[in-house]
Image (cartoon, helix red, strand yellow):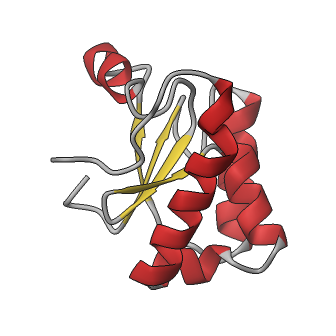
Amino acid sequence: LAASVVLLFMKGSPDHPKCGFSRSIVEVLRSSGVAFDYIDVLEQPELREAMKRYWPTFPQLWSEGVLLGGLEDVRGLAQQGELLDALRSSTARERASLTLLARRAGSGPHLSTTATS
């Protein structure tokens, strides 16, 4: 996580996504002009299982070690005009992460949105 400013954990690659959610999040990022690195979780099953402790599904978008969420969360940030701010500003990134936690608080076990790598 530390090696990339913006990192997408996805199924497949940006040019060859292997699920509709991964394809859609790539479209959101590209249409917003976001440069990002990616990891294909299908090629790294151990990593895929480890990442589920932060978020149970894929894709997952991380910025400087902070989870911004999955497709719906990232799409929402883009639609509200907040995606680029969340990627560029640590304050906006933390606000987006806290909003994500608050929205998800009642939907299952507590999930951390900050990696400790």
Residue 59 horizontal/vertical position (percent): 57, 37
| Left or right position of 41 against 79 | left
Horizontal and vertical percent position of residue 79:
84, 69
Q: Quadrant of residue 20?
A: top right
Residue farthest to the front? 106
Q: Position of residue 74 (x, y in %)?
A: 68, 57
Q: Is residue 35 visible?
A: no
At 45% across and 33% down in the image, what residue appears?
A: 111
Taking 82 as reference, is 98 left or right? left
Residue depicted at x 52% and y 59%: 97
Name above or below for residue 16 compared with residue 47. Answer: below
Quadrant of the image occupied by residue 104: top right
- 67 is higher (above) or lower (below) than 32: above
Q: Nearest the camera: 19 or 100?
A: 100
Q: Residue furthest left?
A: 117
Between 13 and 9, the residue placed more toward the observer is: 9
Q: Is residue 86 visible?
A: yes
Q: How many marks?
A: 0
**Residue 86 in the image, given as x and y percentages of width and height:** 55, 75
Q: Work out whether 11 lies above or below 46.
A: below
Q: Residue furthest right?
A: 79
Q: Is residue 102 left or right of residue 5?
A: right
